[in-house]
Amino acid sequence: MSDKEKSRFVPQDELNRQKEFAKKVREVLSSLYPNGYTPHAFVHSYGCQQNVSDGEKIKGILFSMGYQMTDKPENADFVIYNTCAVREHAEQRVFGNVGALKNIKRRRPNMLIGLCGCMTQQEIVAEKVKKSFPFVDIVLGTHVMHKLPEIIYTKLTGGKRVIDISGEEGIIAEGLPILRDGSSKAWIPIMYGCNNFCSYCIVPYVRGRERSRKSGDIIAEVKEVVASGYKEITLLGQNVNSYGKENGEISFPQLLRELNALDGDFRIRFMTSHPKDATRELIDAMADCEKVCKHLHLPVQSGSDRILSEMNRKYTVDDYLKIIKYAREKMPEISFTSDIIVGFPNEQDEDFEATLELIKKVGYDLLYTFIYSKRPGTPAAKMEDPISDEQKSIRFRKLLSVQEDIAYKKLSDMKGKVFKVLCEGEGRTMENSLCGRADNNVMVEFESTDKSLVGEFVNVIITSSKGYVCLGEIIK
Ligand code: SAH
Ligand code: SF4
Ligand code: F3S
């Protein structure tokens, strides 16, 4: 490993030092909260799965320091919002929720409030919090989470507010404790950061450069969660197809093959795949690996080559359709989902029509649709945009309605098929039912009151569909 590579990993000494701080925090907490009271922490993550996964590490660290988790901020002694900056709306929601904590803190003066994640990594936001939210005690960016024990210790022992958004490039901290949200589905990051700089997107600015975990660490983590009963592993990265490229590790398709070869009854998902790097090698690995779900989330963003080029996406509609075609040839049962941005600066009617055409051609099972949101500091924020908000919402509604017809048709075509479903809990459409996702990511509901099936795989034959849910019956 080169020195540059090494410097991306938080050194073991530093991790050990933080463990010592964690112990000290435990002691401080037990003197601060005597009589056997366990202090409570509320951790909420906004945004993508990567953030949710970070949130599980924050919970793990807090748990190791003696906090018990609560889902009510008003009962918490420490509240931390792990924020998202991808769209303006996400940021406004956080400011609203943080504002509401002011009153709670008035009643609970010892309460600590922290903000971390992508939003606070932006200097301008950290400054705003510093000035306008004096009751927020801790402001952290995305690269200092491993220092939480030291930071909390400083704050609990009378230190000033801590504002730390250092480390722009990003690091990898291995071996942090994790308190996972579920017991059957596990998020496992394989790489962090993004080098793609799509012109609309804030992520590369707040998440640092691409850096991959060692395959050995990933394999060890997968083995560990499978041994503790997890049935679904989702490998995470802003572009999983870049895995291993910067550090000479194995490629992502090779990683899939290695994980597929591990023992155990579990399945593998991954997200997100950037279309410019979605190769035939990736599709071949998906097709060959029986544990890898036949579902590809392949965000296209727009169906217009002109807009794709303005977005700096580095593929054309034709390139995109070629990979879809190849994947369908290899795996006829594969399902596709995607992200679409409506109203990118100066998007014309013909560009939008091209997007509608593309989604009809591909036939997505599900689309995540967004109205373009201007992110200060990104190239798109400086682009002329004569298109009105009203025009954008008309297009947005049109997109939703076209996609709805496609999705309903796809779901009704599933009648008679048998899916392996990972049972997640009670169904919402039918009484006395359970639900879970099929291999192709479709939500399936089936009659059963046998709660022991939750967290297990069951085979379900689809009999009908209702909205976005397939209904079916268990078969042996
Ligand atoms: N790395 C992933 C996406 C991360 S962000 C990828 O490349 O696919 C998730 C989605 O948010 C993006 O796919 C995009 O559709 C949307 N998004 C990102 N920035 C946005 C913005 N400024 N306005 C609206 N949507 C945006
Ligand atoms: Fe953002 Fe593009 Fe990176 Fe995805 S690939 S996180 S959309 S810059
Ligand atoms: Fe949001 Fe950060 Fe994810 S900006 S989408 S939480 S990487």
Image (cartoon, grey):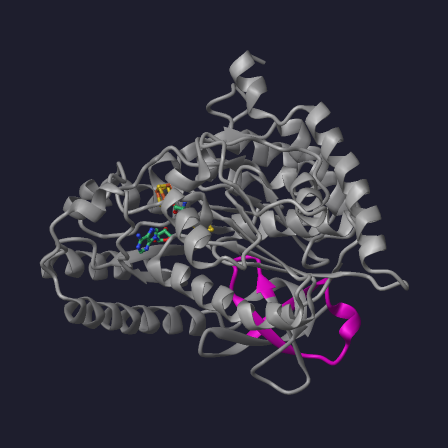
Q: Is residue 122 above or below residue 419?
A: above
The quarter of the picture where residue 347 lies is bottom left
* Residues in magenta, as a range: 437-462
Residue 205 placement (x, y as % from top left): 38, 39
Residue 301 is left or right of residue 110, and the answer is: left
Q: In this image, 39 relative to 364: left or right? A: right
Which of 41 and 56 lies nearest the eye of the viewer?
A: 41
The one nearer the camera, 338 or 98, is 98
Q: Residue furthest bottom?
A: 431
Magenta stretch: residue 449 in it?
yes
Q: Residue 423 in the image: state x and y as whole percent.
A: 67, 66
> Quadrant where the N terminus lies?
top right
| Figure quadrant of residue 241 | top left
Q: Residue at x 58, y 80 (%)?
A: 428
Residue at the image position 80 percent from the left and 41 percent from the top: 24
Residue depicted at 42% across the width and 53% down the height: 131
Indicate yes or no whether the magenta region holds residue 24.
Answer: no
Residue 5 visible in image: yes
